[in-house]
Every structure is written in C-alpha cells, then in structure tokens.
Amino acid sequence: MELKTAADFNFKGKRVLIRVDFNVPLDKQNNITDDSRIRGALLTIRKILSDGGSVVLMSHLGRPLKKLKEDGSVDYAKYTLRHILKRTSELTGVEVKFADDCISNNAFEMSSQLKPGEVLLLENLRFYKEEEKGDAAFAEKLSKHGDVYVNDAFGTAHRAHASTTIVANYYTAANKMFGYLMADEIKHADKVLKSAEKPFTAILGGAKVSDKILIIENLLNKADNILIGGGMAYTFFKAMDGKIGNSLVEDDRIQLALDLMDKAKRKGVNLLLPVDSIIADKFDAAANTAISESGRIPDGWMGLDIANNAIYDFTQVILSSKTILWNGPMGVFEMPKFQNGTKAVAEAVATATQNGAFSLVGGGDSVAAIHQFGLADKVSYVSTGGGAMLEYFEGKELPGIKAITG
Ligand code: AMP
C-alpha cells in the first residue's frame, strides 16, 4: 500500500489540523514524566511549518469523563492540555497558542487567524463525550480548524473516534494524510505482516492467552515459529495434562489452547513452549525460587519466568530468524528475580538484529522491557502503538487508517 503522507505534500499557505497523541504521563504536580509522545510528532509539525503552513494540534489526555472527581464533576484542572503547553513550545521552538475549548467560538477565531509558522493547541478533546462516540456533528466542527487533516496518532488508530476517524470524512482524498510517525508505524508493521523475510518468528508473552488469541490465530497463517512465554504458557501446559501448581491459568481457554496447538501442527508452524520455568512459592519479589519443568510444577508453586533450557531453545530460534515480532514479556520482569527470561529474549532479538534480521517490538510491556534493558536502539523498530498495534497484528483493519486510505 502506497501511503499518502505529509512528506509528499506542500503545506505552503495551508492551515493543517493534526491529530496527535499527546497523552503523556504526568506526575502529581502535573509535570510531564516522559515527553516522547510530543517528540514523536515533531517531524510532522516541523515539515508543515517549514513549508510555510500553520498548525492546529488536537489530542486527548487521559479519560476525563470516565475518571470523575468524588463529587461527580469533571476534573478540568487535572486533564487540561495546558499542562503540556510549555513543553510543546520548547520542543517545537514556537510559542504555541492555546484554545481553552476545542470547539468554542474563541477556538475557531484563534485557528482562523493563524499565520504561517504559528501553532495552536486545542483543549482536551475528551472533555466532550462526542469525541469517543465518534459524533459526526462534533467531527465536522473540528474539521473547520484546518484546510488539511493529518493523522499522526497511531496509538488511537484502532478507535473510530471523532478526531481519529470521523473527521476525515470532511476532507477530500487529496487533503487528508498520515503524519511521519503514523506512516512509520504502518510501514514497519506491514513489513512484518505483509512481506516478512523468512524464517519469521513471533515471540508472544504476557499474562493472558485470552488477550492474545486473535494475534496467535492470525500469525499461524504467517509465522514459521511462534514462541510462547509468560503467564499464558501455563494454560497450554495444563491443556497437555501438565501440572502447573498455582501458575496463572485460564481454565476456560484450555480447549482453545489445544485447538491452537493442533492448528499449528497442521499448518507446519513450530509452536514452541518453554520447557522449564523459574518457579516461586509466592507472587512476591522476595519469594523462594527453584527451577522446574514447566509441566511438572509442584503444588503450592507457580511459574514466574522461563528458565535456562527454554531460554536456550528460544534463543536458537530467534538467532536463526530473519524477521522477528515480539509482544509481551516472558515472565514477571518487573521483579528482578523473574526478569532473566525477558532480558535474554531481548538480548537475542538485539543480536539477531545486529546479524541482519528485521525486528519489531510492540505492546506496552515488551516496550517497557526493551527500554528497561537499554536495548531499544538495538532492535529495528519499537512501536508506540499498544492496543492499535495489537489489533493491526490481529489482522484487523484500523478505522483511523481506513479513514485516510479509503
Ligand atoms: P500483558 O499485558 O498481557 O502483555 O502482560 C504483561 C504482564 O504479564 C506483566 O506485568 C508481567 O508481569 C505479567 N506476567 C508475565 N509472566 C507472568 C507469569 N508467569 N505469571 C504471572 N504474570 C506474568
């Protein structure tokens, strides 16, 4: 798919409405603790400004209508995008203006008066329930802020919200496109999904099978190897009549685990489980630990990480791969005693990448892990997508993408 992007458009004299994802983490004093989402939009903003256009930024911050104050009112002071105004000015190098309501007369007045090189930030879109509802009248109003619409918020592309999807209906095909960040996400995901060089290995981990069923199903049609670690592995062991002690298990997914293993066999996909586990006598950073075969865990113990033989098996497969997709940790990596498997996998992915493989890491916790181990710049691409990336790899069409590509 040839993507229509901001790179190929001349924005001279245009007022450009950009959907960004400035949903940054804030501390108790409302200071930004990680500004990478703002940085992520800079390429797009700079391109428009240097072409001679002006920019209207719109974003959400948190879920203000879901997280009300104790008295039931909206916490405007907590969820205002004013918190990020100063940092956005610093990073863009432009004194960013602020409209304290995204669709007020004042906001339209401000956007209509923007001159080339100027930037306006609109107040939190989610102060309006119409945003998440994908309300057409609200989306049409938003569209009045710009002659051109750019979507650079991959993290919300799986939601048919007013600003991520519906607003695009009010622009001609020529006047809507992806920003650099979003185009980059799609390009890298497509490289894995649509033109993976073989052998293609997917590494899946995390807590629950139920969260990963659709992605496993879809990857069974594409991958040569599927490595399964993390809490979800024990449902597979139980399905094979293994003893898993107190390990995480989803009893209602046992038949599904059997079906997935059967499908893998029929399709010739190597679905590999961790032969051994680091087990613990409680879910605690200070628990006593031992090593056990993953299907022979004693009563009262639980598997919290993959152990050495599993690490060896997984590493061999990873090192012989040309394309690698990694989603989800191999164990409870937040606790030092159970981080070894995730770290070893991260290192193997980094080494394979160094040897020429293409590797994409995505999904909240594996992204956190790759940063924690200082290896983020040793893999080919780290997705900022979260839920959007998961749905893309499930084979779903994302509404935010379809709204632009048609
Ligand atoms: P997910 O959000 O489904 O990707 O799951 C990530 C979470 O799964 C992390 O917080 C891990 O600590 C947790 N996790 C990974 N392995 C295990 C395990 N063996 N037992 C319990 N939790 C686990």
Image: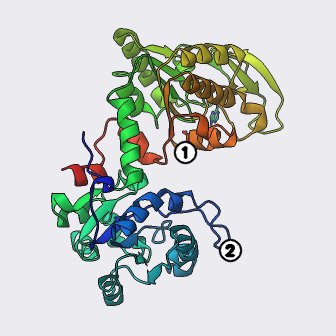
Q: Residue furthest left?
A: 172
Q: Is residue 292 above or below residue 41?
A: above
Q: Is residue 209 above or below residue 262?
A: below
Q: CA distance from mark 1 to mark 2?
A: 24 Å
Residue linked to disc 1: 364
Within 8 Å of ligand 1, the CB of disc 1? yes
Q: Indicate the amino acid at tag 2.
A: Gln
| Residue 71 visible somewhere in the drawing | no
Decide if residue 77 is on the left or right side of residue 193.
Answer: right
Q: Secondary structure at mark 2?
A: loop
| Residue 356 visible somewhere in the drawing | yes
Residue linked to disc 2: 29
Residue 16 x/y as whole percent: 31, 70
- Quarter of the figure that contains the N terminus: top left
Q: Secondary structure at mark 1?
A: helix
Q: Indicate the amino acid at tag 1.
A: Gly
Q: Quadrant of residue 172?
A: bottom left
Residue for point 27% across, 74% down: 13
Residue for point 28% across, 53% down: 8
Q: Is residue 183 above or below residue 211?
A: below
Please tell me which residue lies in front, 24 or 233. Answer: 24
Please tell me which residue lies in front, 132 or 376. Answer: 376
